[in-house]
């Protein structure tokens, strides 16, 4: 299919509201941006956009795989490095902790330097972390493997909030939710592989040298993939298309850099009440997912001893079901634009899925755990792209990386809190009270989601711009028609 070309009028870059702009002092309002829509500007969709989002999805996969590769075989790494369970839990939680202090500098860098620089730094850090791990396969080198994991967790800061940004910069208004879902899809697939592959590559054997050999194989494979992806990003990844894909992006490009302030943007976001509610509810939901993923091995082994491989397969089931849910939700949003209703429905079903999973985990039927875990994953993991896209709608025209960064920052905070608290509850009272603990917070999140005002600013901006373009074109057509239809003037009479 050839690239689609069309002439469009740039849409307004709507700030949260004119009052806030006057108080904070920076940022165009809806009316100011609409005034810029007085000349048609070209927009275009390029085939290359699919290559960009798939490459991003691939290196996101490689990074997220490493988040859970220690936790899913928690007992094996405890034995190899001679450390306790809580220490191995930190190999997952370091991903959450690193994100919190670094997200704001990274988002500022995204605003100043753009997508390509962020992609290069992300893949370089990820590649470096994997090779450090290769050098750490000795029982006395746990600090080295922790350093490698820290590098990978730092790379994640440059990755996690990017799907909505790439979707907005490269994709048309009818594709942004689907493109965002594809970006999130890579992260989810990486987690799925992280659940599945480590228990297969690293069996629970007693011989330390044999165990080191298996761990080394896993680390070398990861390093090879990370190196290849870094090279591809250097060669292929492009900052942005020559022409913008949408009316909204056309106007965003027309804003002079001096009109934008990162600090003012953060302040406007923090004064946006619907977005603040979304930050809290997103954090609660994704924080619960992080806790379940990190502690899954411990929960399964407690009720089904020796089932490390099936624990990984259950994690795979959770994420694969969530990937299907993500794609379905993305396509649904592109077709219906029902952001609030879809988000609320999926959130409520995440709560239902968690209740069913918690109540069936200890029944002794492993096949039933697979089914209930799949139901939980379909909705809980499927919620991820919904939160990203709803945030972009509520905060337009603020930078997508900034809004996504705030969402993820809250998720990391809740993820650390929930993982530590649920782990302590499981150790003292068992898995059922630990899962009930998460159900309570999912219930709170569902209630708060119902109070989020559905203010779809990006959709409104596109409608205003399209209306302005149609009005301008109709005016030009009317002028041309009037000129053509005007009768010829009679020849002038000369006085004789």
Image (tube, helix red, strand yellow):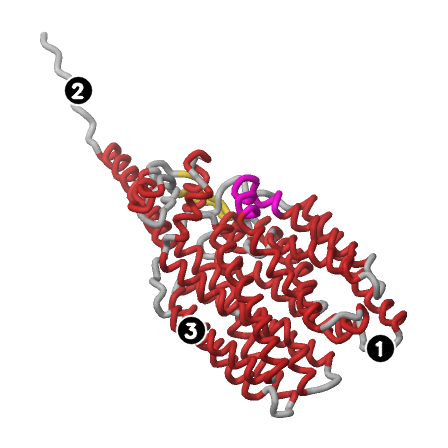
Looking at the image, can residue 369 be seen?
A: yes
Front residue of 341 and 55: 341
Earlier sequence position, callout 3 versus callout 2: 3
Question: Where does the C terminus fall, quadrant-wise?
Answer: top left
Q: Residues within 10 Å of mark 3 (few under 14, many from 20)?
A: some
Residues under labels 3 and 2: Cα distance? 83 Å
Compared to residue 329, the image places residue 32 above or below, namely above
Q: State the residue position of label 3.
A: 444
Q: Position of residue 229 (x, y in %)?
A: 71, 52
Mark drawn on residue 491: 2
Mark drawn on residue 422: none
Q: Position of residue 89 (x, y in %)?
A: 67, 69
Q: Quadrant of residue 255?
A: top left
Residues under labels 1 and 2: Cα distance? 105 Å
Q: Which residues are magenta?
A: 105-118
Q: State the residue position of label 1.
A: 205
Q: Could you tell me which secondary element the residue under label 2 belongs to?
A: loop
Q: Residues within 10 Å of mark 2 (few under 14, many from 20)?
A: few
Earlier sequence position, callout 3 versus callout 1: 1
């Amino acid at each position: 299919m050839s690239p689609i070309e069309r002439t469009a009028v740039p849409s307004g870059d709507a700030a949260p509201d004119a009052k806030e702009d006057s108080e904070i002092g920076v940022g165009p309002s809806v009316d100011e941006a609409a005034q810029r829509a007085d000349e048609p500007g070209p927009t275009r969709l390029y085939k290359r956009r699919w290559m960009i989002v798939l490459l991003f999805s691939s290196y996101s996969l490689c990074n997220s795989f490493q988040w859970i590769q220690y936790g899913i075989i928690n007992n094996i790494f405890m034995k190899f490095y001679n450390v306790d369970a809580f220490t191995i839990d930190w190999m997952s939680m370091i991903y959450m902790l690193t994100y919190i202090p670094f997200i704001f500098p990274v988002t500022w860098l995204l605003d100043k330097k753009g997508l390509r620089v962020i992609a290069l730094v992300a893949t370089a850090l990820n590649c470096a972390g994997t090779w450090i791990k290769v050098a750490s396969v000795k029982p006395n080198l746990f600090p080295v493997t922790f350093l490698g994991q820290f590098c990978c967790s730092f790379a994640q800061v440059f990755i996690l909030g990017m799907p909505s940004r790439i979707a907005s910069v490269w994709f048309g208004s009818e594709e942004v939710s689907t493109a965002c879902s594809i970006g999130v899809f890579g992260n989810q697939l990486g987690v799925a592989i992280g659940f599945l592959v480590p228990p297969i590559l690293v069996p629970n054997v007693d011989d330390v040298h044999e165990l080191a050999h298996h761990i080394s194989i896993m680390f070398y494979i990861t390093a090879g993939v990370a190196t290849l992806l870094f090279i591809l990003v250097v060669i292929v990844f492009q900052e942005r298309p020559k022409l913008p894909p949408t009316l909204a992006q056309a106007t965003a490009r027309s804003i002079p850099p001096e009109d934008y302030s990162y600090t003012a943007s953060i302040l406007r976001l923090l004064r946006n009440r619907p977005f603040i509610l979304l930050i809290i509810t997103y954090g609660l939901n994704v924080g619960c997912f992080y806790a379940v993923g990190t502690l899954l091995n411990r929960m399964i082994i407690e009720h089904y001893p020796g089932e490390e491989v099936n624990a990984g397969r259950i994690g795979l089931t959770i994420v694969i079901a969530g990937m299907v849910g993500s794609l379905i939700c993305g396509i649904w949003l592109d077709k219906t634009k029902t952001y609030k209703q879809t988000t609320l429905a999926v959130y409520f079903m995440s709560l239902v899925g968690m209740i069913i999973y918690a109540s069936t985990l200890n029944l002794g039927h492993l096949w039933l755990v697979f089914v209930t875990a799949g139901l939980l994953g379909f909705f809980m993991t499927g919620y991820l792209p919904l939160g990203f896209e709803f945030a972009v709608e509520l905060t337009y025209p603020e930078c997508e990386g900034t809004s996504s960064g705030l969402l993820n920052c809250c998720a990391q905070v809740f993820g650390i809190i929930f993982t530590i608290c649920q782990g302590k509850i499981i150790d003292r009272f068992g898995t059922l009270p630990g899962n009930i603990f998460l159900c309570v917070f999912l219930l709170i999140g569902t209630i708060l989601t119902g109070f989020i005002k559905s203010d779809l600013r990006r959709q409104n901006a596109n409608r205003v711009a399209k209306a302005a373009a149609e009005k301008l074109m109709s005016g030009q057509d009317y002028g041309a028609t009037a000129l053509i239809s005007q009768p010829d003037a009679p020849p002038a009479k000369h006085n004789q």
